[in-house]
Image (cartoon, rainbow, N blue to C red):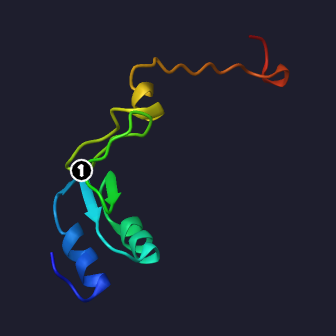
Amino acid sequence: MKWTDEHEVIRRANDTELGLGASVWTRDSAQADRIASQLEAGNIWVNCHAEMQPSTPFAGHKQSGLGSSTGDDGLKAYCNVQSIYVAGPDAGDL
C-alpha cells in the first residue's frame, strides 16, 4: 500500500482481525525497525516475504492463532509441564 504518513500506514496495517504475517519494504533500516516493532503480527519480514527458519517461532497474533509451531516455543507445546511445590522446614511436616 502506498503511504506518506508512518503512523497512518501502521494504523491501516493493524486495522484487521488477523495477524499472521507482515512485510516492511524500505531502504531505511531505522524506519524498518520502527514500523516492524509496531505491527501486530506474529511474523514480520523486512525487504522479503515468507522467509522461514525452523529455529525461529512461527506464530500468529489476534485471530491468527495462539502459540507457535516452530523454534523452542513450538517444541514446548509437546512438553508436559509439571510444577512441584515443597513446603519449607518452617511450614510444618510434609
32 left or right of 49 in image: right
Image x and y of residue 92, in percent: 79, 18
Q: Give, as a three-letter code, the residue at label 1.
A: Leu
Front-most of residues 17 and 83 = 17
* Percent of width and height locating residue 19: 23, 55
Closer to us: 38 or 17? 38
Q: Quadrant of residue 83?
A: top right
Quarter of the figure with residue 78: top left
Task: Kindly identify which residue carries mark 1.
Answer: 20
Indicate the position of residue 23 as horizontal and vertical percent values: 27, 61
Q: Nearer the viewer, residue 66 or 32?
A: 32
89 vs 6: above or below: above
Q: Residue furthest right?
A: 89
Residue in view at x 45 percent, y 19 percent: 79
Is residue 58 rendered to the left or right of residue 92?
Answer: left
Based on the displayed image, in which of its 4 quarters is residue 58 positioned? top left
Quadrant where the image shows the N terminus: bottom left
* Position above or below: 70 against 88: below
Q: In terms of secondary structure, where does tag 1 sit? A: loop
Q: Kindly give the residue lying farthest to the front in the view shown.
A: 27
Residue ID at (74%, 21%)? 87
Q: How many marks?
A: 1
Q: Percent position (x, y) of residue 65?
A: 24, 42
Towards the viewer: 49 or 72:
49
Residue neighbourhood size for the residue with mark 1, other residues' Cα within 10 Å, grouped as few (<14), some (14–19), many (≥20): some
What residue is shown at x 78% (from left), y 12% (from top)? 93
- Looking at this view, name the residue that lies furthest to the bottom: 4
- Quarter holding the C terminus is top right
Residue drawn 33% across the image and 32% down it? 69
Vertical position of residue 45 compared to residue 85: above or below: below
